[in-house]
Amino acid sequence: MSAPDYGHAFTLWRDQAPEWHAYTHHPFVEGLRSGNLPRANFLHYLRQDYIFLIHFTRAWALAAAKGETLAEIQAASATVQALAHVEMPLHVQICAQAGMDAAALEASEEAPANLAYTRYVLESGYSGDFLDLMAALAPCVLGYGEIGARLQGSGGVYADWINTYAGDDYQGLCRDVGALIGSALVHRLGPGWASLPRARHLSARFATATRLEVGFWQMGLDGP
Amino acid sequence: MSAPDYGHAFTLWRDQAPEWHAYTHHPFVEGLRSGNLPRANFLHYLRQDYIFLIHFTRAWALAAAKGETLAEIQAASATVQALAHVEMPLHVQICAQAGMDAAALEASEEAPANLAYTRYVLESGYSGDFLDLMAALAPCVLGYGEIGARLQGSGGVYADWINTYAGDDYQGLCRDVGALIGSALVHRLGPGWASLPRARHLSARFATATRLEVGFWQMGLDGP
Amino acid sequence: MSAPDYGHAFTLWRDQAPEWHAYTHHPFVEGLRSGNLPRANFLHYLRQDYIFLIHFTRAWALAAAKGETLAEIQAASATVQALAHVEMPLHVQICAQAGMDAAALEASEEAPANLAYTRYVLESGYSGDFLDLMAALAPCVLGYGEIGARLQGSGGVYADWINTYAGDDYQGLCRDVGALIGSALVHRLGPGWASLPRARHLSARFATATRLEVGFWQMGLDGP
Amino acid sequence: MSAPDYGHAFTLWRDQAPEWHAYTHHPFVEGLRSGNLPRANFLHYLRQDYIFLIHFTRAWALAAAKGETLAEIQAASATVQALAHVEMPLHVQICAQAGMDAAALEASEEAPANLAYTRYVLESGYSGDFLDLMAALAPCVLGYGEIGARLQGSGGVYADWINTYAGDDYQGLCRDVGALIGSALVHRLGPGWASLPRARHLSARFATATRLEVGFWQMGLDGP
């Protein structure tokens, strides 16, 4: 099965990220697919993912703050809205069903792999511009889309998780984010952006964020 | 008529801002009330307000990025959502009815008074923390609420504008923002925050932003 | 006399900034040249310039924070060092000689034209990247160099001020900043940067900052 | 031997950081003391420390940008100057003597523990205010001072490294930074700052940064 098409920039950056395969085919991901991932590891991942989502929402809010056109601001703010008012409450609910209430989530200590990834993304946005932030956000948003698409139909105890990312809503979001990145690149750098030095810097940001995604799965696999 | 109650911090800061009356009773405001404000000045204001709203939306997005609790992030992101997906399209529509299409709006040169105010707010947020940003945002959000409440029922050609800010939706927003500021202060500085040096700094930010609001009305009154 | 050469980007941006002549030949500048500028206006300017320099130093520090190479960080930090530990103490001393002690300087209220300019520069840097910050900083640094070079030898009561900016030290700084901007552009955008959309955005930042410089001189001319 | 006195805030925060002892007595540190740390691990550490110092310099520059008084801006910029124009060139020279030239340093891939720590510090500063940044910077600056003071006179192959941090210059810097933190706290929060909620948040930042310092030593110990 070929990878889903989320636009030209994603295709380029993914092909240039040495650890893309290590990320999208990580043993943690394979454990979700086969259903063999121990429950304790999944819960540890969920708990850290709650903290992750808070910082990820903040990073998308920063993207809205750094947008240069009304369209960019609106696209980023729609994602913030979805994360803060749909994704986060849903996540809290899933954790509650798994026996972790809000207090337990709040009391979690943030794992180093979580700190590394979220702060790298946020700092990319603060120190750089909208494009730097997009390049650092892309591996998470679009990588989960690619993983979801690949794992679709695997069944098993993690089918709900898989179906969230394989579903039409999330796949549509991925295409929207891919389109946002594409138009943001052309708006600033023109249609020939891929041949500029800037393209190498952005690709390096994407690759570093991908590397930190591998660390995040590994943190889940290592367990609490 | 007494001023509306948007919380303790607002009451304090308003009382300490030397130009609060000059802002809320500016001749431009009185012109809206009496209906004597020339149409050309109102249109000039609307056109600049379009640019203002873009940066104001960005500033609220920055607040979401800088929130320290899920509740702060959610409250700020709800405001971003309302601004980017309700207020801005409405504003574009009002301008269109007044004969200014999107291209005309985009082509407007940002007035110095607009640059001064919006960049002061954003820079307060970037250089300071969530509280600095709230103190700089408050004069606009809550001042318009106070003006709307005072002008309610004035009638005249600017009744639509007045009713937007006098209405329940906007007054509710003001109380929500007042509550957000209050809880953010207590969360960081405790219940005795008003006696700390920090309170003076925040009050000074509020006063400077108020001064820049006076300049914004004056820009409208001076006309295109 | 031809304008001094501070590099390709400056030449381009200056030629595209509609108010460059209004800035560099402002009546305040002509008053410095002829010596006819009233002392009270010069002191008002000095007092505001003290506040300006604080924020300008902060903006250069932000540039050091946003540099992507050791050379960029070192160049920006050398400017911070010169501003914070040479320029500022010198300015305090000049003001003291003119009868304004440190307490008087600290007590000055920042003029709207000052707020507009400094916050525009800082916000350009925070919301954009190193290049956005450079484009917003350039009109001040390099414009003063051009003005100094043009007014050199005018004599009169403001000869000290003129000689500061006409002198070798300051002219060398201008060439260094011009070279920093040039290499930062090529490092990110390649040798053909001037034809990219980004070049228009940066030129627009330079033009807006130039417009705010005109406002700063005008504030001096309008007096306290 | 008692720990050196770098001020009240440091004493409080250190006592509240669960991993302070794990940081200051890490096996890597003990290896420096005994001289038993393998050379390859020390070189790996030096190589990563080069990248660390670049981001650390940027973080201090951000502190200068976020300072609220001339004294804060000057103190932070003096540190930037020392880091960018003394410490970094010295580090490059030490690495060269150890056989790693500038190109080798530039080509190093930044380790996750390095990314985690440096981006956590920078993001603390960008998202919070000057105090948040100080709390995140303190464990490195002051912890190295405490380690240097404790290891002084150990002799062995790492005596040069130890003497750098045990020496008067560095110990003086630690006292200066401690004083800067103390006055910044009082300036904003008053003399009773330690009883405010804010004090807990700052202490938590210090503790998280300490935890990431442990990870940095461990990265050195794990080797290339």
Image: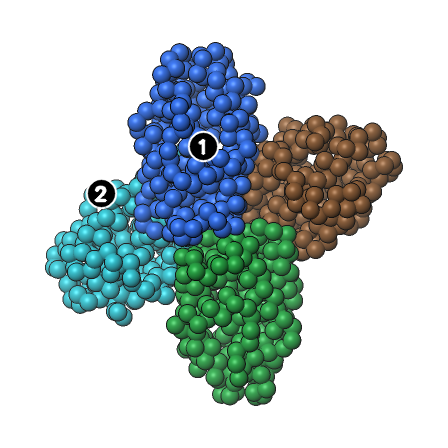
Chain colours: A green, B brown, C blue, D cyan
Using the rendered view, name the quadrant where residue C156 is placed. top left
Residue C163 shows up from this direction: yes
Residue drawn at point x = 67 percent, y = 31 percent: B219
What crowding class fits label 2: few (fewer than 14 Cα within 10 Å), some (14-19), or many (20 or more)? Answer: few
Q: Name the residue type under label 2.
A: Asp
Q: Nearer the viewer, residue D63 or B35?
A: B35
Q: Which residue is mark 2?
A: D169
Task: Tell which tag, 2 or 1, sits nearer the viewer.
Answer: 1
Count of numbered circles on the image: 2
Where in the figure is residue A165, as x and y percent of width and height?
59, 76
Report helix, strand or loop for mark 1. Answer: helix
Numbered tag placed on residue A102 in the rendering: none
Disc 2 to disc 1, C-alpha distance: 37 Å
Chain assignment, label 2:
D
Mark 1 is on which residue type? Cys
Q: Where's residue B116, x and y in %?
A: 58, 35
Q: Position of residue C11 (x, y in %)?
A: 43, 36
Q: Which residue is mark 1?
A: C140
Please name the residue shown 71% across and 48% down the image.
B102
Query: Toward the viewer: B97 or D93?
Result: B97
Where disc 2 sits, the SS reads: helix
Q: Along the horizontal axis of the image, is A211 left or right of B86?
A: left
Residue B27 image point, x, y percent: 75, 27
